[in-house]
Image: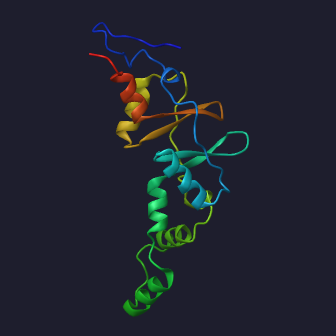
């Protein structure tokens, strides 16, 4: 593991590798897990997102609290059809409506998860991971070695690295 220090004595994110600061005990869910179980895991572990993996720990997506909040806050479908009937117009984007309708009935993780996921490698620098988290407004990046999820790096991991407890 490479844990660099700058000339000021502060941790050096340009020299330190993700593997030195990532979380390796990762809460994960499977694509076929029920939404309720995934929501319980997020709440129980006080986390905002989890990698979605298969039995071989290959990444299929990420499920976040945003995905669950959107899924849980959908309008009651008969109400939507009633409103549409009253107005007499179809939604401007049929594809968007179909996607939202599918999410409204999501019962499994794969129905609500985000499938296009950014990742990083254990050999990437903390600086590179932090840049992705910041620029893309993410809270967690899955860390993959080949196709296998080996950890996650979060904003909290980076904050703990940059501002270690007991440091002056």
Residue 26: x percent and y percent? 57, 37
Residue at left offset 33%, top offset 23%: 163
| Outermost residue toward the right in this view | 55
Residue 69: x percent and y percent? 44, 61
Relative to 2, is 59 on the left or the right? right
Image quarter in which the C terminus is found: top left
Q: Is residue 115 visible?
A: no
- Vertical arrangement, residue 80 with respect to residue 30, above or below: below
- Where residue 90 sits, quadrant-wise, is bottom left
- Where residue 66 sits, quadrant-wise, is bottom left
Residue 119: x percent and y percent? 52, 36
Q: Nearer the viewer, residue 46 or 17?
A: 46
Q: Count the marks: how many?
A: 0
- Vertical arrangement, residue 87 with respect to residue 56, above or below: below
- Vertical arrangement, residue 43 with respect to residue 167, above or below: below
Q: Nearer the viewer, residue 163 or 75?
A: 163
- Vertical arrangement, residue 14 with respect to residue 46, above or below: above
Residue 117: x percent and y percent? 52, 44
Q: Nearer the viewer, residue 53 or 29?
A: 29
Relative to 74, is 113 on the left or the right? right
Q: Is residue 149 visible?
A: yes
Residue at left offset 31%, top offset 17%: 167
Residue at left offset 45%, top offset 22%: 125
Residue at left offset 45%, top offset 85%: 79
Colouring chosen for the image of the structure: rainbow
């Amino acid at each position: 593991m490479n844990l660099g220090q700058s000339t000021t004595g502060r941790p050096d994110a340009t020299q330190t590798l993700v593997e030195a600061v990532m979380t390796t005990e990762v809460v994960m869910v499977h694509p076929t897990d029920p939404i309720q179980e995934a929501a319980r895991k997020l709440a129980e572990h006080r986390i905002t997102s989890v990698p979605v993996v298969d039995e071989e720990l290959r990444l299929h997506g990420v499920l976040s609290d945003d995905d669950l909040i959107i899924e849980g806050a959908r309008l009651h479908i008969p109400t939507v059809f009633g409103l549409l009937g009253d107005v007499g117009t179809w939604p401007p984007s049929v594809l968007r409506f179909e996607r939202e309708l599918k999410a409204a009935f999501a019962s499994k993780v794969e129905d609500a998860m985000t499938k296009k996921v950014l990742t990083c490698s254990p050999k990437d620098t903390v600086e590179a991971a932090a840049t992705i988290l910041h620029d893309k407004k993410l809270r967690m990046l899955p860390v993959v070695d080949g196709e296998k999820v080996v950890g996650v790096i979060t904003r909290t991991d980076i904050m703990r690295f940059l501002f270690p407890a007991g440091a002056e």
